[in-house]
Image (cartoon, rainbow, N blue to C red):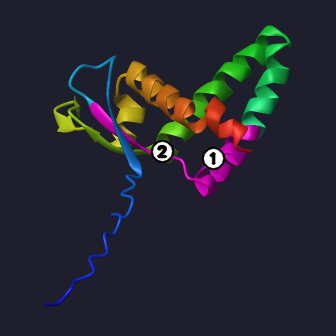
Amino acid sequence: MMKFISRWRKPAADYQSLLWLESETVPGVEFSIRKMSLAQRLELSSRVRGMTLRNEFLRSGALSDQMEANVADLLVQKLYVEWAVADLKGLRIDGQPASLITLIDRGPECLVQEMAEAISAHLELSDAERKNF
């Protein structure tokens, strides 16, 4: 009689690098954003850091400075969306399937803002993640 030794192997972890979200502002639209790896978090954070530090300073200044800070906030939103949105489904602009470029150029601003907020929320570390540092 032969004895077979069965080695049960734990399946490998399956990590999905994209997160699909349904739009709350434009029904029927779905978009995917890249989940942040450490390298991606460093890259994006360093690109945004200079803009946001300057914005805080400008917000406390004169009206013209505050207007410049608002423009910079929009540029940060655009940077987030261009950097992290991987795919877009369920939206047509002027009869054509929307791309990221047409969304930013001619699409609903509320959708771009929603995407930027979702990216920002996923960029920030959770309390549990912060405790590990």
Q: Which amino acid does label 1 sit on?
A: Leu
Q: Is residue 28 above or below residue 81?
A: above
Quadrant position of the N terminus in the picture:
bottom left
Please state the horizontal and vertical placement of residue 67, each as a whole percent of the image.
71, 16
Q: Which amino acid does label 2 sit on?
A: Ala
Is residue 72 visible in the rendered image? The answer is yes
Seen at 26% across and 76% down, the residue is 6
Dot 1: element: helix
Q: In this view, does 1 lie to the left or right of 31?
A: left
Is residue 125 visible in the rendered image? The answer is no
Q: How crowded is mark 2: few (under 14 residues within 10 Å), some or many (20 or more)?
A: many
Please state the horizontal and vertical placement of residue 34, each as a whole percent of the image.
45, 47
**CB under 8 Å between discs 2 and 1:** yes
Q: In this view, does 7 lie to the left or right of 50?
A: left
Task: Single out the residue that lies furthest toward the top.
Answer: 63
For marks 2 and 1 on the same chain, the one whose residue lies earlier in the sequence: 1
Q: Please tell me whether the stretch drawn in magenta is mainly helix, strand or loop.
A: helix
- The Cα–Cα distance between marks 2 and 1, rounded to whole angstroms, is 9 Å
Q: In this view, does 4 lie above or below 101?
A: below
Q: Which mark is residue 44?
A: 1
Seen at 85% across and 22% down, the residue is 57
Task: Single out the residue that lies furthest toward the left.
Answer: 1
Q: Which mark is residue 84?
A: 2
Quadrant position of the C terminus in the picture:
top right
Number of callouts: 2
Q: In this view, does 81 lie above or below 13?
A: above
What span is colored magenta in the figure? 30-49
In magenta segment, residue 32? yes
Dot 2: element: helix
